Image (cartoon, rainbow, N blue to C red):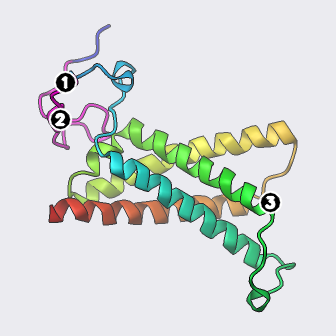
């Protein structure tokens, strides 16, 4: 069965269909010609936000890694600084950043987060950030579950839940701040 026709001027894959105005396609590319569009997914219209989301997720991963190292009983204290970072903590930060970025990016593209973010509707931006976070959490949980199956290691559920809540608060705040940019423009 063919998909239903789109109403002119609306985003197709937003969780709130018909509420976000759509930009006209660029003159060099016809609508529906990109690989994401062929899969039925709205391509990112706000490419700088995509890159800045990656930076925000990397920042959050580094913040969580530093907090985890500082909370470790073996931490010598800040007076012993500079403390050399261990390869394990850098690997943990890289994997955490990758998990957060991959989940957030896939969720945002799926939910039209790079279309919604160009508009100044704080309630819509926060709702879209929440829906994106839910998808990112599912991807992150699948990632952790795959790691548990592959390595047989245990997961600290309390730490995982804390990371998920911090991810929601951090990225929702970031997206809300980004939406203020659209108000100024």
For the residues labelled 1 and 2, say whether their Cβ atoms are less than 8 Å apart.
yes
Residue 2 on the magenta span: no
Residue, far left:
8
Q: Which residue is mark 1?
A: 6
Q: Where in the figure is residue 27, as x and y percent of width and height?
A: 15, 28
Q: Which residue is mark 2?
A: 10
User: Which numbered disc covers residue 87?
Assistant: 3
Q: Earlier in the sequence, mark 2 or mark 3?
A: 2
Q: Residue at x 56, y 64 (%)?
A: 60
Examine the rendering and report whether any part of residue 41 can be seen: yes
Q: Magenta segment range?
A: 5-29
Q: Image quadrant for the N terminus?
A: top left
Q: Where in the figure is residue 40, as x and y percent of width and height?
A: 35, 23
Where 183 sits versus 154, above or below?
A: below
Examine the rendering and report whether any part of residue 128 can be seen: no
- Quick check: 74 left or right of 12? right
Residue 28 on the magenta span: yes
Query: In the figure, residue 85 lies in which quadrant?
Result: bottom right
Q: Earlier in the sequence, mark 3 or mark 1?
A: 1
Q: Where in the figure is residue 63, as x and y percent of width and height?
A: 61, 69
- Quick check: 34 left or right of 141? left
- Quick check: 54 left or right of 35? right
Q: Nearer the viewer, residue 1 or 81?
A: 81
Q: Main secondary structure of the magenta part?
A: loop
Q: Residue at x 53, y 60 (%)?
A: 167
Q: Secondary structure at mark 2?
A: loop
């Amino acid at each position: 069965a063919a998909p239903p026709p789109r109403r002119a001027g609306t985003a197709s894959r937003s969780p709130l269909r018909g509420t976000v105005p759509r930009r006209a396609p660029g003159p060099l590319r016809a609508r529906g010609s990109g690989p994401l569009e062929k899969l039925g997914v709205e391509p990112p219209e706000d490419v700088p936000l995509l890159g800045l989301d990656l930076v925000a997720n990397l920042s959050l991963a580094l913040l969580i890694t530093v907090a985890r190292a500082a909370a470790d009983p073996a931490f010598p204290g800040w007076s012993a600084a500079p403390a050399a970072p261990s390869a394990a903590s850098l690997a943990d930060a890289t994997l955490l950043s990758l998990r957060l970025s991959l989940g957030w990016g896939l969720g945002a593209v799926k939910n039209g987060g790079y279309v919604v973010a160009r508009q100044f509707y704080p309630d819509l931006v926060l709702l879209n950030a929440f829906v994106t976070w839910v998808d990112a959490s599912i991807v992150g949980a699948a990632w952790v579950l795959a790691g548990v199956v592959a390595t047989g290691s245990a997961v600290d559920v309390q730490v995982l839940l804390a990371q998920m809540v911090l991810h929601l608060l951090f990225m929702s705040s970031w997206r809300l701040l980004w939406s203020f940019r659209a108000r100024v423009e």
